[in-house]
Structures are given as C-alpha cells and as structure tokens.
Amino acid sequence: MNNQDLDQNEMVFDRSADIAPANRSAALAFVASGLLGMLAAIPLSAIIFLVNARFPGQLEKTVAILGGIFIILSVSAPGIYLLQQRRFADPRVLGWLALTGGSIVLVSTYLYWVSFYVRFPADILIWSESDFVNDILKFRVGYPIFSAQQNNDSFPYMPGTQLLTFFLAWLSGNGLSIPAYRAIQVGFTLGAAVIGVGCVSQLIALAQPNRRVHGWDWSGTFYLPMLFLFATNALTNPFVHNLHNDALAQLISVVAYALLLKYATNPSPRTLFLMALIAPLGFLVKQNLVVWAVFYVGYLIVFDQPRSMRRVVAFAVLTFGSVGAVFGLCYLLWGTHYIYWTITVLANHTMSLLRSAQHVLDVWAYFTMGLVGGAILLRGKHFNRLLGPWLVWLGLILIETWSSGIAWMINHIGPGSLIAGIWFLAGLHRLGLAMHQPTPRALPLRLWFRVGIGVAVVAFFFSELGIIRLPLQPFGDAPYKYIAAIEQEFVGQASKDILLDMGTWVYVQDGVIMKDRAPTIGERGYSDTGDFSEMIRRLEEKRYTKILIRNLHRADLWYEYATWHKPSGIRQALLANYHEIGKIPAVAESNPGWLLTYGFSEISILVPNPK
C-alpha cells in the first residue's frame, strides 16, 4: 500500500470523528436513563405479584384492580407535568411521559409473567429445551455433541448458546440449574435491548451529525423498555426466555448492526476487525448468522466512501476465512456426524412461500415500523449515509421472513423486528417526541394536535406488536404435579433404563445421555432424513424397562406424525413389543395465560411384553 492509499484510509477513518463524542454522550445518557426505567418496572411487578396472591383464582377482580393501578401510575407523571407547566406545557414531553408510563407498565407485566416460566424446573416448555440441556450434559460428561444419527441424541442447532449458557451458570454457582439457564437467556435479551438503545443513538447521530447533547437526556426511559418489549414480543420472539438459541442469536445480530452503524458513523480499522468476527461467532450460535458477512461485504462495496476494493477483499478473506476455520474445527471434533446434523437435516427442510407470505401479514406492524422509521430518517442531505444501514435491515428481515417458511412459527424474524423498532424509535426522536427543555411560551394548537395523533398511533401499535400480556399468573400447580408424576416413575430404578420421550432434567444428576429422544426424531422424520432402524431394533430387544411417551394413540405422535411422507415404523414397534400399564394425565389449566400444551400432553406408561 503506497502513501496515497494510507492518506485516503486516514481520511476515511476520520471523516465522522466530529460527531462521535456527542453520540457517545447521548448513548450513555439513553442507556443510563433506560436502566432506571427498567428498574422502575421491578417494584410494579412486585405489586402485580401481591395482588394476584391476595385474590387467587379471582381473575376478573385481579385484572380490574391492577388495571386501576396501571391507569393511576400511567397518568401521574403527565398530570404532575401539566400542573407544573400549565399553559407552557410541551405536548411532546407530555406524549413522551404517557408512552414511557405505558411501556414501564408493560415491562412489569412481562417480568411477572415470565418469572413463572423461568423458574419452572423441567426442560419441557418447548421442543428445544430437552436437547439444549442434553448438550450441556454431554459437555459435562465428555460425550460428543454430535454423534451418529442412529443414536437419536443430537439436534441440528450449533452448540455455542448451550456452552456459553453452561459457562455463565457455572460461574454463578448454578451449573446444573435449568431456571438459571433460562434466566441467562433473559439476560441475553436485555443485553440486546441495551445495545439497541446504542443503535438508536447512532441513528440519531447519523441523521443529525451536528447534534450536541446538553445535560441529562431522559429519553432512554422510554427507549429501553420499548426495545426490551420488542425483543420479548410474543409474535417473533416467543422463545427468548426458553432454552433455545434465539436469545443469543438476537443479541449477536443487534451487536452486528451496532458495529455497522458505528462504522457508518466513524469508520476505523478496529471496528472493521470486530465486524469480521461477527459471522464466525454467530455461526457457532446459529448457522444463518453467517449472512452478516454477506451484508458487510455488500455494504463495503456499495456504500463505503471512498471505496477500496483492497479493503473489501481483505475483509472478505478475514471473515469468510474465520467462518471456514470454525467449520473446520467443528468437523475435526465431530466428523461427518456434524455435517449430517447441522447441514444435511436443515438442507432437506421444505420451504413454503405461502407460509412466508402469511408471516409477512402476521408481522406487518414490525415491517411498518421499519419502513416508517426509514421514511422519517432518510429525508434530507444525509440520505446516502443512512440508506446503507436501512437496506441492510430490510434485507435481513426479508431473509428472515423467507426462511421462516420452513414452518408455521415466526421466531426467525425476531432480530429483524427488534432492529425495525430501533429505526422507529429513532424516527420518533427525529420528530421531536422526546424530553425537551421547558419553553417560555405557549405552543400552537396544531402542535398539540399533531403530537396527539402521533401518540395515538404509537399506542395503537402496542396491540399489534405482541407486547401486551395479562397481569395474571400463567399457570398454577398442575404443571408441577405433572413433572412430579414423571419423576415418580423413575424412583427406585436406573434412569438409564427408562426412556422419557422429551425432558432431560430426570437424567442430569446421573449424567445419563439418553438415546431415542422424540424432538430429534420428529425433526428428521419431517425432513425425511432419518434412519430409525436402530431404535426399532432396541425396541424389539426390549432395551428399555419402561417408556414414557406422549400422544401414543394420536395422529401427532412425535415419533411418527401422520403428515410425514413415510412412516418411521416406530409406532408399530412400540405396540408390538410394549404394552400400556398406566397414564399420566395431560395438564389442564383454566388460566387464560396458559398456552403450553406441547410438553404437557397425556403420557402413556409402557413396559415390555412378557417373553
């Protein structure tokens, strides 16, 4: 590289240095005030707990009392502000106070609601939890994360989330705690929201490069709670409190986007190096996070000014080479079994464009937020600076929506939805819906009208974003009695001889890696990639002294769905070699918040037929 190239690079990496200090100050103020907003939700969630405990089973009365409390708290701050400022009140501040109060109430409801799921001691809340804990158990006992498919004890997710979760739980002294594992996922989600606040600040700096922060900015008390609600929404992020890779994948995606905005604001070799590490680290968590390498390279080619193909090639070699190194290391550790589980199985999923189109309609509000935020911020002379990051968000959410066509669930669209919320909040800030200094004069009526319409529209979006939850206990004692009945079947017997179709908590203390688990068989039966002959042979040999299996007599038996292209043969082998001696009833809950039926259906208790 000659001296001219060095001079050009220096110019590129310094071209936005004038806005960096102001942006850092704003980001710190946003995050600090946002954490205060989150802290305010904690005592309110304690009030929700006390009211529910005081009126057990009286759902309507509980909701009525809490609704009254929420209304009083939500209008208190705007009311005090109006009394203080009177005719000099600023409608933008009033609207901001109202939305902030509403967001804190919604966060408090979520914290109360999610606490019941986080504390549940068995790993059966969703299909991935059993294998998630199984991977942690494998690491502890030295068993391969990916083994031969005939063992039916692995699943197609990369092990990064499981291993990091175990490491953090171990550091806290809770290495064997399933609730601790879930609490860590909630921590990842909060981290994504905090980084998202920094992204809001970066977008504001890109749209208003001459902006300076004077004094304390309380705007984050609305931004952080709202971003946390977006990161935990029931539509596109329903599993971030469960044992799944979604929470960490979302955190990595938001960090990736923050680095992109940082580079767009103030390019530097250090930021570029960190960007190159995102794809290999993301690959360890979720295979599709490699797409960030593609986005970064595309951004450098199209939007980096002045463009340097040498820089593009060097970046591409580093980031894709690092992904290749991670892939090679995994292959050295687990061989062809790794290829089968993480590539072959997923590559055979059927993609439905009809489902993808339906998912666009399901999450239209998040698409709208990103589009509206872009329309607000892309106005003016800084269009070119903001267009690249906005197109990266649009490309991300479109790819996520397309890939979600492999199933009816839409959790793939979680990171794109959160980034859409980042653009929306930055757009609101650009429009002036934030804290302002007191004005020495009365503001015109048209401003009150415009702000009122804006606040009403934002409040309307609340109902379409999956962020409203009932302040009710989602379930009572029935799920606990259900897992106690399962544990009773293991009393006095070796756990290695009893097959539970889903749920690893009963094997953790004994360090047993159980074969023939239902979720992994269901995954491969659906994609028609499984060889189940060894499980059938084990059933014919009556290898298990007892089998606990859900949905044995239904069409949606996890071991053999009626919709599969061809039967697995497992149902026939079960009925031919085992007979039913009892049942564990399905969980029946009357609470309107009860949604979990997947891991709580009726269990048939099977024992071998006499020889």
Image: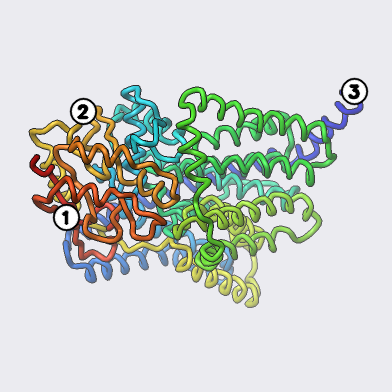
Mark 3 → mark 1, Cα distance in angstroms = 73 Å
Q: Nearer the viewer, mark 1 or mark 2?
A: 2
Q: Are marks 3 and 2 in contact (CB under 8 Å)?
A: no
At a point 35% along the width and 41% down the height, the residue shown is 183
Q: Nearer the viewer, residue 355 or 76?
A: 355
Answer left or right for 342 relative to 144.
right
Q: Is residue 543 above or below residue 244?
A: above
Tag 1 secondary structure: helix
At a point 73% along the width and 50% down the height, the residue shown is 388
Of labels 3 and 1, earlier in sequence is 3
Tag 3 secondary structure: loop
Tag 2 secondary structure: loop
The outermost residue toward the front is: 611
Callout 2 amino acid: Asp
Q: Nearer the viewer, residue 41 or 80?
A: 41
Circle 1 residue: 478
At a point 27% along the width and 70% down the height, the residue shown is 64
Look at the image and name its color scheme.
rainbow
Q: Nearer the viewer, mark 3 or mark 2?
A: 2
Quick one: label 1, few (<14), some, or many (20+) residues within 10 Å?
some
Circle 3 residue: 2
- Work out which quarter of the rendered image holds the N terminus and state it: top right
Residue 169 seen = yes
Find residue 198 and report its image quarter. Answer: top right
Answer left or right for 526 relative to 509.
right
Circle 2 residue: 510
Callout 1 amino acid: Ala
